[in-house]
Image (tube, rainbow, N blue to C red):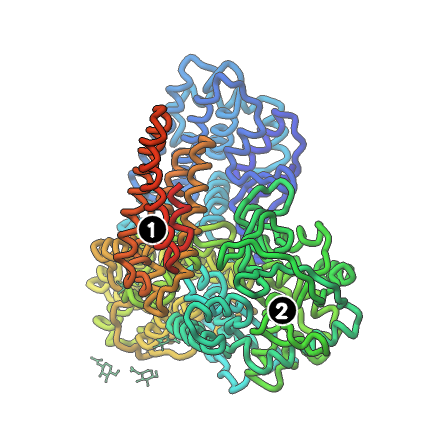
């Protein structure tokens, strides 16, 4: 086991002592908290149990290491909890940070009394032997106890406590730990404790009231920064701002440069058969956009490509439904997508389409190359053919039982099983059904092309070893699991019309399957952008291209396995991905977004709410499902809007600018910085440092937190200096006021730059208020200089954000609450509701009914099935709505009523007959009733023959 800690941190001492008591072998590794190369900010200390398991909370690690008997565990836990929430933070702030806050100080003194009383007539805290509670408290008190002055000041009256401290100090386990880990001084130790804790949680609120030390001196910030940091801040501040890099202007066509960092960015091409929802937006285009904007302000040579994925059966289905040609459907949805992304300010250099002529050319070319290189073969394939519909059934037109052993999911799709997540071969489905007419399809054979993935596997394996370390964690896991299972040949052609035709005789009536053709879209869209596209995709030897691909995790296999395999097999020096950045899923409130069910807020809805697109961007990035699924929630959106944007960020910036306007004639005053000011700059520099290192790794969710930390520091700085008071004081005080305001305006200017990737409009507005244009960042030397030197004229300040009223949030929540159900209808605003949508909904309902039933009968947690049941209710509402709005349906409304009545009559009549028969009545008695029943049934059958309802309705009744 390994303990990671910063130097001097008494919390590490706990772990060492606990390890000694338990006889566990531990090593320790000292971390420098300012080291930017550290992989992931964690708080210190933490315990690495093994490669897969890390305990981040020090007291949890003590608990884990220290043997503790059952019967005392509650009491021990209470002490651990108290130590970590009261004792340690109070010591850290009073001794470590020099806080003069009276509340915290008195909490500290009463802590010692509590401890002293607890040891009255007792050797240890919770039993007769030393245990985890003693170790934890002891290590935290030890630095104080060792300091003669502080010990007298705080512990003089605590004789029991002192006796206990000395007693514990004598134990060999403790002595050994002290020998191996030095604690230099009390102040140093509690600073280290604070740094270790803050380091991980840059945005964690300080313990109660610490931020309001307003009328105390700001001294408390002093000790937490080092002299080196202060010196660096002083040097940076005195640099000439003109040495700072300027933002390069964007050329008409972005092409790689040998001297630059050349960054190629793609976001997964959304399918054109639907309106994207918030989950799609944060999963690919928005994430890619933030990263692209960040690269651009770093002056990296950046190309950001996106577009719509237009081929495939989903398009054909949609076209059937809407009675349009495939091309028309694509154009229509292409425009919808493009408009939504424009509204979200997604800064594509080019947003193209995968049905463009370039696609045909490149797709056929890549195929031929792979074929020439021996990575293709043909085989006769059994395909499902529906006689009733007279067509080969593409994967998405069939469903059935999952063929994978152990998974008994009954509604697997033709390409993938939602039950186990594995890919499925449609012909292997158990009991396949045609999704259009529900009849059972038959197998027919035809020749198809296969890509020989097993043959490509060694190449891929070699490549993945080099490339995968740069991928997001989930992408690595998914990619590796694919290779671990071994690759199989995969069919890449289909008997369909809408797609890129196979360029070989005998195959010209077939097209490429969408997963083969879609990723080629990145190249063909680049080609549509510039004829020089190969400079990006087949780079010259002296041009290094780094490819980042953003997507949701369900898209990983295509980008981690299939597409690279094709590129490697073509063997033409294509650019392959070095950073697959995959998100987890974003949920809507407590359910899931779903295209097919139309659940959730969609791109066009977001626009209609009147909430600015920057606020949407901010919130989606704030909850970006980076390492686990996360949820969109209206209430949370409002809280973040008000607390973070308005009260924190907006408040800081507006205060600084308004102050400069009212008291300094919109001009940056002369500034004479003292240690306090530089300390503030050090704290901001640290956040800037972390911001850059997060964004370099595309950790967008963390990046935004560092922005908010800067303005939080800024608010504290302003609050503790109170320029409004200083302004009424002596001439020196006035200069001081000018300094504080000038420094704050400069930090506002830094914020304008840092906000640009996340909130481009807000950043622009702020830049105007500051009267600046340059927003470059210099990742090579991370420092804060006088972006706005004395004498700089500012623009007109105005609030950046306004409050989102709770009543408005409630309104929106209500408006969208019915949304889940009636979303399909809303989508109806774009297209008429078709019979197929009703069928899809009905099928979904049947599925959901099943799910709920299973959950209930399996005695699952109530919450679980209630959530599913809520979805079911929504779905039913949705169906009701949809039936009303379905044009065909509404014409037939009377027929429906009739059917309902008839169904009721049939069932009544049925039970009449049954009762008569069961009651042993004469044939003569029940015969007429049977005739009546048959008549009713045939009437019903006639009605059911109408296209609206087909057999479905009758079936559902059972
Ligand atoms: C963002 O989009 C809006 C509306 O489309 C537009 O007015 C604005 O100029 C865009 N802002 C940026 C920074 O691109
Ligand atoms: C909160 O949302 C409202 C829209 O209702 C918007 O006008 C306002 O600017 C947002 N507030 C912040 C702080 O962004
Ligand atoms: C304020 O600044 C403007 C120029 O920005 C200048 O013309 C004006 O005289 C200044 N007013 C005062 C009171 O200094
Ligand atoms: C912006 O700054 C420039 C240079 O400092 C100055 O000439 C100009 O007047 C300022 N603009 C406004 C609107 O104050």
- The picture quadrant where one finds residue 671 is bottom left
Residue at (28%, 54%) from the top-left corner? 813
**Residue 939, which numbered label?**
1
Residue at (57%, 26%) from the top-left corner? 66
Q: Are marks 2 and 1 in contact (CB under 8 Å)?
A: no
Is 572 drawn above or below residue 903 in the view shown? Answer: below
Which quadrant of the rendered structure holds the C terminus?
Answer: top left
Looking at the rendered image, the disc whose residue lies closer to the viewer, 2 or 1, is: 1
* Sooner in the amino-acid sequence: mark 2 or mark 1: 2
Q: Is residue 720 visible?
A: no
Q: Residue 476 location in percent, x, y?
A: 63, 54
Q: Residue 252 location in percent, x, y?
A: 51, 87
Please state if 455 lies on the left or on the right of 601 as rendered: right
**Towards the viewer: 326 or 855:** 326
**Towards the viewer: 74 or 689:** 74
Residue at (65%, 55%) from the top-left corner? 479
Q: Residue 178 location in percent, x, y?
A: 59, 32
- The picture quadrant where one finds residue 531 is bottom right
Q: Residue 901 location in percent, x, y?
A: 27, 47
Furthest residue toward front? 924
Counting other residues with Cα less than 10 Å from the Cα at mark 2, is it few (<14), some (14-19), or many (20 or more)? many
Which quadrant of the rendered structure holds the N terminus?
Answer: top right
**Towards the viewer: 158 or 575:** 575
**Residue 388, which numbered label?**
none
Which residue position is annotated with label 2?
A: 495
Secondary structure beneath label 2: loop
Secondary structure beneath label 1: helix
Counting other residues with Cα less than 10 Å from the Cα at mark 1, is it few (<14), some (14-19), or many (20 or more)? some
- The picture quadrant where one finds residue 540 is bottom right
Disc 2 from disc 1: Cα separation: 41 Å
Residue at (52%, 77%) from the top-left corner? 353
**Towards the viewer: 103 or 263:** 263
């Amino acid at each position: 086991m390994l303990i990671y800690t910063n130097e001097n941190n008494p919390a590490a001492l706990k772990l060492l002592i606990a390890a000694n008591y338990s006889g566990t072998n531990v090593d320790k590794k000292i971390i420098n908290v300012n080291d930017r190369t550290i992989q992931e900010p964690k708080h210190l200390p933490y315990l690495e149990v093994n490669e897969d398991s890390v305990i981040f909370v020090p007291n949890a690690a003590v608990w884990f290491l220290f043997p503790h008997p059952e019967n005392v565990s509650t009491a021990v836990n209470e002490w651990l909890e108290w130590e970590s929430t009261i004792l340690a933070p109070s010591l850290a702030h009073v001794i470590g940070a020099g806080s003069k806050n009276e509340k915290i100080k008195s909490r500290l003194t009463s802590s010692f009394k509590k401890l002293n009383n607890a040891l009255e007539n007792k050797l240890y805290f919770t039993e007769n032997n030393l245990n985890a509670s003693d170790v934890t408290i002891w290590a935290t008190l030890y630095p104080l106890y060792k300091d003669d002055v502080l010990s007298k000041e705080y512990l003089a009256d605590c004789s029991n406590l002192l006796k206990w401290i000395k007693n514990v100090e004598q134990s060999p386990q403790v002595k050994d730990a002290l020998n191996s880990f030095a604690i230099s001084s009390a102040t140093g130790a509690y600073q280290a404790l604070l740094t270790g804790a803050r380091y991980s949680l840059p945005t964690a609120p300080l313990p109660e009231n610490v931020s309001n030390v307003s009328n105390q001196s700001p001294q408390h910030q002093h000790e937490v920064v080092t002299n080196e940091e202060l010196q660096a801040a002083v040097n940076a501040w005195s640099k000439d701002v003109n040495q700072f890099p300027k933002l390069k202007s964007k050329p008409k066509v972005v092409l790689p440069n040998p001297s630059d960092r050349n960054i190629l960015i793609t976001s997964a091409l959304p399918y054109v058969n639907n309106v994207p929802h918030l989950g799609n937006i944060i999963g690919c285009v928005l994430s890619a956009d933030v990263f692209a904007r960040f690269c651009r302000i770093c002056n990296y040579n950046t190309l950001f490509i996106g577009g719509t994925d237009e081929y495939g059966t989903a398009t054909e289905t949609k076209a059937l439904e809407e009675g349009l040609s495939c091309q028309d459907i694509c154009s229509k949805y292409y425009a919808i997508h493009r408009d939504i992304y424009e509204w979200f300010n997604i800064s594509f250099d080019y947003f193209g389409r995968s049905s463009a002529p370039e696609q045909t050319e490149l797709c056929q070319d890549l195929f031929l190359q792979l074929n020439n290189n021996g990575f293709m073969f043909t085989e006769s394939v059994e395909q499902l053919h529906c006689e009733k519909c007279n067509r080969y059934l593409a994967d998405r037109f069939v469903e059935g039982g999952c063929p994978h052993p152990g998974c008994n999911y009954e509604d697997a799709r033709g390409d993938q099983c939602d039950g186990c997540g594995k890919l499925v071969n449609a012909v292997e489905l158990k009991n396949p059904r045609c999704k259009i007419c529900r009849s059972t399809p038959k197998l027919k054979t035809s020749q198809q092309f296969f890509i020989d993935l097993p043959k490509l596997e060694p190449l891929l394996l070699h490549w993945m070893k080099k490339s995968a370390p740069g991928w997001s964690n989930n992408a690595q896991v998914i990619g590796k699991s694919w290779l671990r299972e071994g690759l199989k040949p995969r069919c890449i052609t289909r008997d369909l019309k809408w797609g890129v035709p196979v360029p070989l005789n005998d195959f010209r009536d077939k097209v490429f399957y969408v997963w083969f053709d879609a990723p080629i879209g990145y190249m063909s869209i680049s080609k549509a952008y510039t004829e020089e596209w190969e400079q990006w995709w087949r780079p010259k030897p002296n041009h290094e291209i780094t490819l980042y691909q953003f997507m949701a995790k369900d898209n990983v296999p295509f980008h981690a396995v299939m597409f690279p395999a094709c590129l490697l097999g073509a063997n033409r020096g294509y650019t392959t991905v070095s950073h697959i950045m995959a998100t987890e899923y974003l949920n809507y409130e407590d359910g899931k977004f779903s295209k097919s069910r139309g659940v959730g807020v969609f791109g066009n809805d977001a626009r209609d709410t009147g909430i600015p697109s920057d606020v949407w961007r901010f919130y989606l990035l704030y909850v970006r499902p980076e390492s686990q699924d996360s949820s969109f929630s209206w209430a949370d959106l409002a809280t973040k809007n008000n607390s973070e944007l308005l009260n924190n960020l907006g408040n800081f910036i507006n205060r600084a600018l308004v102050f400069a306007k009212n008291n300094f004639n919109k001009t940056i005053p002369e500034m004479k910085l003292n240690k306090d000011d530089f300390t503030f700059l050090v704290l901001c520099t640290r956040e800037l440092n972390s911001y850059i290192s997060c964004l370099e790794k595309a950790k967008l969710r963390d990046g935004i937190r560092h922005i908010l930390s800067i303005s939080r520091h800024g608010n504290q700085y302003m609050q503790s200096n109170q320029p409004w008071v200083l302004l009424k004081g002596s001439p020196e005080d006035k200069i001081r006021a000018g300094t504080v305001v000038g420094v704050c305006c400069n930090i506002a200017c830094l914020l304008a730059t840092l906000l640009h990737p996340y909130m481009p409009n807000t950043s622009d507005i702020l830049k105007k208020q500051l009267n600046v244009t340059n927003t470059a960042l210099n990742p090579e030397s991370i420092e804060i200089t006088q972006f706005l030197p004395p004498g700089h004229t500012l623009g007109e300040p105005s609030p950046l954000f306004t409050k989102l009223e709770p009543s408005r949030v409630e309104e929106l929540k209500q408006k969208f609450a019915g949304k889940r159900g009636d979303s399909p209808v809303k989508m109806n605003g774009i297209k008429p509701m078709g019979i197929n949508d009703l069928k899809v909904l009905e099928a979904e309902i049947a599925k959901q009914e099943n799910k709920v039933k299973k959950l209930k009968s399996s005695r699952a947690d109530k919450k679980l099935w209630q959530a599913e049941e809520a979805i079911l209710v929504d779905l039913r509402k949705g169906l009701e709505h949809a039936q009303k709005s379905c044009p065909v349906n509404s014409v037939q409304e009377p027929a429906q009523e009739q059917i309902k009545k008839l169904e009721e009559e049939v069932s009544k009549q049925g039970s009449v007959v049954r009762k008569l028969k069961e009651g042993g009545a004469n044939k003569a008695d029940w015969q007429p009733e049977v005739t009546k029943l048959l008549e009713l049934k045939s009437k019903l059958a006639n009605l059911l023959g109408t296209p609206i309802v087909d057999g479905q309705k009758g079936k559902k009744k059972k």
